[in-house]
Amino acid sequence: MRDLISTIDTWRARGDTVAIATVVKTGGSTPRPLGAKMIVNSRGEFAGSVSGGCVEGAVIEEALRVIKNGAPKLVKYGIADEIAWDVGLSCGGMIEVFVELVS
């Protein structure tokens, strides 16, 4: 987390808006644990991981929406969802990710 805080500080110092995505619920086989974090800035750059690469692209898109409209969002990815295969979460598990602005 220290590395992410340093990166947040750097991004904010140059004027970027930053969102943080946190794994708040898991089920079954998941690539990252509860509490895993990823940050995304308004330029689309990111650091950290919520899924070991499985759904990062989809989470980045959600984070950019949160940055644009300011409203936090809870997103769910799992094998039961047809999007799970599209975004790469084919491990059989489920994750819920809360995305919010860094204030």
Image (spheres, rainbow, N blue to C red):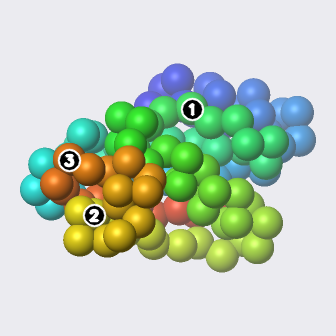
- The label number, if any, that marks residue 1 in the structure image: none
Q: Are marks 2 and 1 in contact (CB under 8 Å)?
A: no
Residues at marks 3 and 1, CA–CA distance in whole angstroms: 22 Å
Looking at the image, tell me whether mark 2 or mark 3 is earlier in sequence order: 2
Q: Amino acid at mark 3?
A: Cys
- Assign a secondary structure to mark 2: strand
Q: Are marks 3 and 1 in contact (CB under 8 Å)?
A: no
User: Along the horizontal axis of the image, is 14 left or right of 67?
Assistant: right
Looking at the image, tell me whether mark 3 or mark 1 is earlier in sequence order: 1
Picture coordinates of residue 98, whole percent (x, y): 45, 64
Picture coordinates of residue 72, whole percent (x, y): 58, 72
Picture coordinates of residue 9, whole percent (x, y): 71, 33
Residue for badge 3: 91
- The label number, if any, that marks residue 78 in the structure image: 2
Given this view, does label 3 or label 1 mark the residue nearer the observer? 3
Label 2: how many residues lie within 10 Å, few (<14), some (14-19) or many (20+)?
Answer: many
Q: Amino acid at mark 1?
A: Ala
Looking at the image, tell me whether mark 2 or mark 1 is earlier in sequence order: 1
* Residue visible at 45% across and 72% down in the picture: 74
Given this view, does label 2 or label 1 mark the residue nearer the observer? 2
- The label number, if any, that marks residue 47 in the structure image: 1
Q: Who is closer to the viewer here, 42 or 15?
A: 42
User: Quadrant location of the C terminus?
Assistant: bottom right
Label 3: how many residues lie within 10 Å, few (<14), some (14-19) or many (20+)?
Answer: some
* Residue lying furthest left: 28
* Numbered label tally: 3
Q: Is residue 96 visible?
A: no
* Residue visible at 77% across and 34% down in the picture: 11
Residues at marks 2 and 1, CA–CA distance in whole angstroms: 22 Å
* Residue visible at 20% across and 47% down in the picture: 91
User: Along the horizontal axis of the image, is 50 left or right of 67?
Assistant: left
